[in-house]
């Protein structure tokens, strides 16, 4: 089989080249089916309970997806003629926002007051340019005393105000994305505020809310694609040029890499995948892993050519040598990625599947297209054996210091590993974006001037039509709102109970002593009817009341908290409710809550994924190494790096978000390659009758340098992701790079010492009866080079 | 004038007072914008003429609200209407259901030259309150009908443009555009389909402030009263933006019930049953 394959490649390179290019092209065409979903809901599966709760609440009450414009005037006071004029203009123009259904601000707040038997309902701010100092003071007082405004639409110190635009964008579905609509909305509002800021240079504008968050998911992801992928390709070209010392070999590799990406994404397109912030980094990951395959092959061929073999002989040698090892390491890597299908979050599962496909595409192309290209291109290498001896010296050093190395490295692993407990599962959706991105900076400024940007919506179901009018129900709603306001996590609460109290006061000649809940339900119902009759288009109460007025929705704005605190607040609220409002059903929902819960549930699924990866990969290792014993030994160098890596992560960050949750399963498949290479060589030497020491030296000299180089490439590739503005990707890249680096240290310092210790009294390891086909290497000087063996 | 009946007529009537061509809307088979405006007006005028002299009426109606979750809620109301010559009509709405607002009565005087006047009698407070609000575009009883959709139509409130002839559900219709002249209107325009035979409204599309389609109102089950006046029994309003809908069903409609001007003032409000 292998021979047949080799001969085909060597005899018909051109035909193969054309065939491969045609196949690659056919696969890549699928890329036209790929589309980008910027929707944050890609992180949740359709049957994810918190998402369903959220969507149910959005159907019962109106949708409240929003874009908030935070206006911060330089003079530190929004209550001036000029600043109110600006706010009035912004409020008016905001109605033109595509898909908008309502606009709320201090300007169009429906202020109610009474005069004789008249109930007057009007915009709080009218003709702002003509207001006198007394008018301004009156408006300021009303705003500060109105719980719906103070701390919500106006800062408690009047330094900033918000114009909140609610939009009704069609939900993204499997077939219909809504990224275009999101971009349309944000572009419109940004255009509006840009125009205003040219006429009102005294104020700064910032955009927050669910829609800008969605926008950031869409645009920052695409920016990554536009900047990081080319940067990564550049870096790889540089690294390859240095390592391979041949422009043509480098070019051949780059062709393979580019095709690997286009075929992977094309296959993804054929299979119906879509791109999102979660899958946008697949090209970088796949490219990084493909480099390792190519480097092994090219380096082996170059080694053979240096020794004086012809190009085709050298390529045959390289293929023969690498086919099986590259297959096995690719398979373990793919298995690691595939276990991500267990993730609670569909895009993480997609990321796993696409990457697994990519890894296997990389394998296929590096053992087909790459040798063909190397055959066709006039790659030349000077015949001159290369010598370093560095690895041999290092092996000697390790052998000499094995007694110290073993306890020291074991202790270090234990110490760093123990810091694993410093990690907590935490997803802070507002901080998914790096400082310096528009969205994150806006969120931070809003937090500084006014309030956090996280929210939880609470629906209170009375269970009977018109039940919201019952004084007991209003009283409980009020008590709940008050309880929420006392919680340290809560910045602002909007509740219908405040409206009832205000109406009661208005209906009693604005007598402050009537600022309380109406005493009977008919009164409450009739006040509400009167009030609703007086409200203008878009400013109705339908976002707080359902159609039969059996339930009401409270909106709470929270400080920008982590998922843990948000879930804790939800739990406390439910507990309070169970104790104090037993007859009323409570539901809680919001994007913040969805992200808060996904972190926890996803972590559970990822622990299962990690165990699955461990079992599957260990089984593969046992098969590959044909030794249960070595398979068992490999557990420590395979698990150790993740343990130490997460220990160090605990020290530098300690936050396990969605991105981090996949790192353990994913890295396991990658770092296991190093162990496979090292143990295979070690075992081969032992099988040949060498003692443990000699076997360690042999392992170092034959694969040491290759491991070093592939590690450099992988660390560089994943570190590149750290530059992503999207924190799930940057954290994931950073942690993965860290773990891969640690894996090399473990394989170089701990593993040999461990093997020497275990095999001490075990001088002659029996030959296995069947000779290893897969991991066999040609006998060549044990000096040497890059990737000469697996 | 009964506010719901006025809804029907509101959307279809016109006077020359407010006639002005919509400069942006070309007429189908255009012979010019001037022409389109004139034709729009002529149709509205004709329609108005046909509905003159209905006098007074009393009706019973149910309003069924639905949201996209499938929740439903029913309101029951009675309406007394009085045609007023040379000014807006008068309407009295009495709420029977939901129970909490039973006995609440809403009195509305439409005017041609000044803002409408509205009073609400709150039985729980035993007081009549005047609603001093220029806002007329909010939802009526939480439904998808805006108060504006139902307030007595005054001709000054629209300008008309004839658009085209079109067959809607098998009925040949004139399609006329109406642009509200009131700056407090929630709409930028309405498109009305009137059957060519009787000039009855078949469908109305409402466009919001950003000129997007907001709601569609469909009329069905037309009946002829006093051999002259067509009234639809079922009005269905669908909001395209929030997925909610409201069906307004007339269960009983009587003309010439003896109502006079004396039945429509704030003193009688508190006595209605």
Image: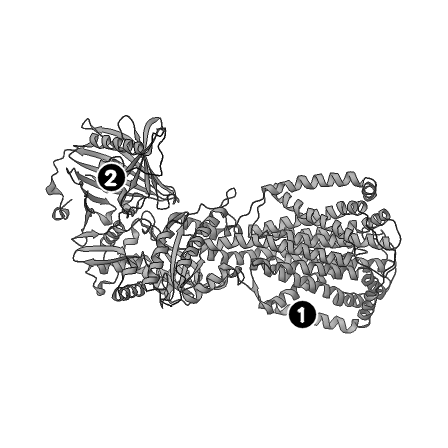
Write down the residue under mark 2. B18
The label number, if any, that marks residue A414 in the structure image: 1
Q: Is residue A231 visible?
A: yes
The correct choice, above or below, for B91 with respect to A616 in the image is above
Q: Position of residue B39 (x, y in %)?
A: 28, 31
Letter of the chain that mark 1 sits on in the rendering: A
The correct choice, above or below, for A643 with respect to B112 in the image is below
Image point (63%, 48%), residue name? A354
Left or right: A118 with respect to A199? left
Q: Position of residue A117 (x, y in %)?
A: 17, 55
Residue situated furthest right in the rendering: A308
Number of numbered callouts drawn: 2
Q: Residues within 10 Å of mark 1 (few under 14, many from 20)?
A: some
Labelled pair 2, 1 in contact (Cβ < 8 Å): no
Circle 2 — which element?
A: helix
Q: How far apart are labels 2 and 1 at the CA level?
A: 87 Å
Name the one closer to the observer, A70 or A701. A70
């Amino acid at each position: 089989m292998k021979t047949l394959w080799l001969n085909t490649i060597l005899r018909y390179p051109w035909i193969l080249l054309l065939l491969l290019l045609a196949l690659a092209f056919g696969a890549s065409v699928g890329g036209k089916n790929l589309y980008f979903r910027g929707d944050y809901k890609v992180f949740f599966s359709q049957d994810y309970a918190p998402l369903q709760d959220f969507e149910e609440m959005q159907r019962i009450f109106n949708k409240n997806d929003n874009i908030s414009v935070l206006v911060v005037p330089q003079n530190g006071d929004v209550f001036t003629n000029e600043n109110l004029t600006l706010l009035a203009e912004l409020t008016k123009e905001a109605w033109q926002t595509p898909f908008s259904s309502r606009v709320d601000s201090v300007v169009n707040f429906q202020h109610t007051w009474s005069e004789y038997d008249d109930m007057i309902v009007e915009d709080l701010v009218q003709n702002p340019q003509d207001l006198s100092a007394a008018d301004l003071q009156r408006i300021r007082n009303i705003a500060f005393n109105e719980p719906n405004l103070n701390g919500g639409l106006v800062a408690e110190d009047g330094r900033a105000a918000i114009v909140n635009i609610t939009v009704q964008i069609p939900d993204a579905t499997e077939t219909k994305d809504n990224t275009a609509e999101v971009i349309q909305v944000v572009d419109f509002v940004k255009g509006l505020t840009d125009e205003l800021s040219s006429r009102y240079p005294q104020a700064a504008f910032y955009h927050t809310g669910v829609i800008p968050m969605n926008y950031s998911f869409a645009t920052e992801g695409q920016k990554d694609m536009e900047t990081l992928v080319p940067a990564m390709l550049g870096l790889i070209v540089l690294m390859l040029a240095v390592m391979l010392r041949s422009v043509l070999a480098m070019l051949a590799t780059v062709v393979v890499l580019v095709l690997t990406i286009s075929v992977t994404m094309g296959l993804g397109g054929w299979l119906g995948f879509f791109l999102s912030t979660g899958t946008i980094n697949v090209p970088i990951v796949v490219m990084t892993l493909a480099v390792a395959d190519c480097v092994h092959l090219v380096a082996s061929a170059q080694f053979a050519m240096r020794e004086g073999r012809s190009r085709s002989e050298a390529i045959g040698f390289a293929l023969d040598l690498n086919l099986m090892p590259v297959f096995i390491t690719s398979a373990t890597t793919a298995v690691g990625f595939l276990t991500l299908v267990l993730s609670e979050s569909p895009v993480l599962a997609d990321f796993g599947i696409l990457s697994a496909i990519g890894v296997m595409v990389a394998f296929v192309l590096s053992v087909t297209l790459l040798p063909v290209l190397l055959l066709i291109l006039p790659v030349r290498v000077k015949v001159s054996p290369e010598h370093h001896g560095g690895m041999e010296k290092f092996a000697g050093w390790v052998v000499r210091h094995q007694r110290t190395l073993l306890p020291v490295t074991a202790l270090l692993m234990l110490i760093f590993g123990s810091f694993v407990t410093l990690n907590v599962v935490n997803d802070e959706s507002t901080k998914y974006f790096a400082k310096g991105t528009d969205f994150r900076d806006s969120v931070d400024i809003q937090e500084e001037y006014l309030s956090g940007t996280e929210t939880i919506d609470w629906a209170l179901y009375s269970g009977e039509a018109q039940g919201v009018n019952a004084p007991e129900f209003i009283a409980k709603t009020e008590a709940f709102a008050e309880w929420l306001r006392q919680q340290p996590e809560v910045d602002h609460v909007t509740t219908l109970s405040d409206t009832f109290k205000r109406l009661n006061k208005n209906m009693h000649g604005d007598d402050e002593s009537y600022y309380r809940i109406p005493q009977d339900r008919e009164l409450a119902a009739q006040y509400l009817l009167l009030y609703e009759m007086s409200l203008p288009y878009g400013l109705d109460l339908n976002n707080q009341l359902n159609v039969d007025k059996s339930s009401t929705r409270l909106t709470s704005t929270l400080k920008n908290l982590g998922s843990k605190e948000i879930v804790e607040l939800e739990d406390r609220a439910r507990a309070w409710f169970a104790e104090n409002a037993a007859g009323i059903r409570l539901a809680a929902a919001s994007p913040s809550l969805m992200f808060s819960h996904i972190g926890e549930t996803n972590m559970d699924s990822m622990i299962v994924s990690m165990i699955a990866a461990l079992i599957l990969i260990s089984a593969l290792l046992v098969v590959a190494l044909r030794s249960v014993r070595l398979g068992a030994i490999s557990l420590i160098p395979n698990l150790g790096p993740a343990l130490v890596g997460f220990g160090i992560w605990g020290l530098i960050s300690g936050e396990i978000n969605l991105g981090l949750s996949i790192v353990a399963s994913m890295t396991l498949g990658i770092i296991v390659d190093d162990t496979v290479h090292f143990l295979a060589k070690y075992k081969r030497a032992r099988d040949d009758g060498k003692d443990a020491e000699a076997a360690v030296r042999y392992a170092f000299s034959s694969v040491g340098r290759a491991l070093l180089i592939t590690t450099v490439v992988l660390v560089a590739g994943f570190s590149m992701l750290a530059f992503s503005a999207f924190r799930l990707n940057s954290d994931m890249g950073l942690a993965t790079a860290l773990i891969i680096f640690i894996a090399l240290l473990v394989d170089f310092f701990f593993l040999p010492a461990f093997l020497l210790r275990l095999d001490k009294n075990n001088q002659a390891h029996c030959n296995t009866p069947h000779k290893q086909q897969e991991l066999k290497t040609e006998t060549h000087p044990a000096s040497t080079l890059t990737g000469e063996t697996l | 004038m009964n506010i719901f009946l006025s809804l029907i007529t509101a959307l279809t009537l016109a006077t020359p007072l407010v006639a002005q061509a919509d400069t942006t809307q070309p007429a189908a088979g255009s012979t010019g914008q001037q022409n389109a405006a004139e034709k729009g007006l002529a149709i509205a005028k004709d329609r108005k003429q046909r509905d003159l002299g209905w006098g007074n009426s009393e009706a019973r109606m149910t309003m069924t609200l639905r949201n996209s979750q499938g929740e439903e809620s029913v309101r029951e109301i009675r309406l007394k209407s009085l045609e007023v010559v040379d000014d807006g009509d008068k309407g009295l709405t009495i709420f029977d259901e939901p129970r909490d607002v039973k006995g609440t009565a809403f009195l509305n005087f439409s005017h041609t030259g000044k803002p409408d006047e509205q009073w609400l009698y709150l039985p729980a407070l035993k007081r009549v309150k005047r609603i001093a609000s220029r806002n007329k575009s909010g939802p009526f009883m939480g439904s998808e009908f805006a108060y504006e959709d139902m307030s007595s139509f005054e001709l000054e409130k629209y300008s008309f443009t004839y658009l085209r002839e079109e067959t809607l559900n098998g009925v040949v219709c004139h399609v006329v555009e109406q642009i509200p002249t009131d700056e407090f209107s929630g709409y930028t325009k309405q498109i009305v389909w009137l059957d060519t035979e009787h000039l009855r409204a078949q469908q109305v599309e409402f466009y919001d402030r950003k000129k997007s389609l907001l709601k569609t109102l469909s009329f069905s089950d037309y009946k002829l009263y006093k051999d002259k006046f067509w009234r639809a029994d079922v009005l269905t309003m669908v909001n395209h933006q929030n997925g909610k809908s409201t069906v307004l069903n007339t269960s009983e409609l009587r003309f010439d019930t003896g109502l006079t001007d004396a039945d429509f003032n704030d003193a009688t409000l508190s006595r209605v049953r």
